[in-house]
Amino acid sequence: MSSSSTPFTPDQQKAQAALKALEFIHDEQILGLGTGSTVHHFLAALGQRVQQGLRVRGVPTSEATAVYAKQLGIPLLNDEEPWDIDVAVDGADQVDPQLNLIKGGGGALMREKIVANAARQFIVIVDQAKQVPHLGLPFPLPVEIVPFGWRTTQRHLENLGWPSPLRYKDGQPFLTDNGNYIADLHIPEITDPSALDSSIRQIPGVVECGLFLMMTSLVITGTNSGPMLHRAS
């Protein structure tokens, strides 16, 4: 479909990127399985390939991903096994021109970062709207924090200069799969992601930050003209 034709919806762009990512998956690989709506498309397509005979094993980054992968018949490694991950495939909330990411909109940032860091290749699949000139608002930066003393941790985060409200769901603090809270930092423009990441990590009570810096091997973006590939330089 050309750009002059009816545009793809964001969901169609996500599916397009997910199907392209499947071309990088091969027999006998161990896969990192991300979390979120774009990865949902990837898992559905991967499940079909597994039913057709593809032999892979997966490491899920969330309980939701684990449940869906099992429903699709994708074999999973357990948490106690040593992971030698060939390819991790995940989505992102934002991608900048240097392929730095903001992740954590779904609350799985810590497990996602562990799996991405353990993989030889980290493939990120997104729709076109996730490509931004710089990281920051309108998408806040998620930071996972421990519940103990969370108000003090939150105050230290806000002392960096931006509102950092706690994330809530159904009137209660949102809980990650690790039993932690998330503070969402409302930063208009992240001009120095590396320095910000370092400052956040030095705060006691912080478990993980949603900045994924210099980790991405390949970004596949669904567009009206078909999937576009952006490789790390």
Image (tube, rainbow, N blue to C red):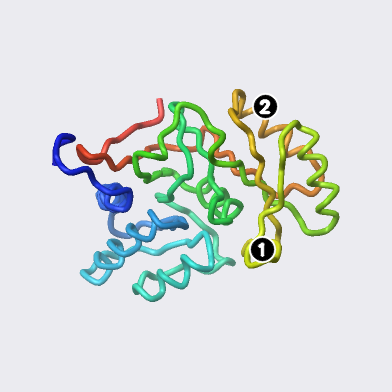
- Count of marks overlaid on the render: 2
Question: How far across and down, in percent of the image, does residue 120 sit?
Answer: 44, 44
Structural crowding at the residue carrying mark 1, measured as other residues with C-alpha within 10 Å and reported as few (<14), some (14–19) or many (≥20): some
Residue drawn at 43 percent across, 27 percent down:
97
Provide the secondary structure element on which disc 2 rests. helix
Q: 161 or 41: nearer the eye? A: 161
**Residue 7 falls left or right of residue 38:** left
Where residue 206 is drawn, which disc sits there? none
Within the image, what quadrant is residue 220 found in? top left
Q: Quadrant of the N terminus?
A: top left
* Whether residue 37 is situated above or below residue 208 in the rendered picture: below
Which quarter of the picture shows residue 226? top left
Looking at the rendered structure, the kind of residue marked 2 is Ala
Pointer 2: what residue? 195
Residue 133 locus on image (x, y percent): 45, 26
In percent of the image, x 61 and y 52: which residue is there?
110
Secondary structure of residue under mark 1: loop
Report the amino acid beneath label 1. Answer: Leu
Looking at the picture, how far across and down is residue 23, in whole percent? 25, 49
Which one is closest to the eye, mark 2 or mark 1? 1
User: Which residue is label 1 attached to?
Assistant: 175
Q: Nearer the viewer, residue 31 or 207?
A: 207
Residue count near mark 2 (Cα–Cα under 10 Å), binned few <14, some 14–19, many ≥20: few
Q: Earlier in the sequence, mark 2 or mark 1?
A: 1
Choose between 137 and 131: the one closer to the eye: 137
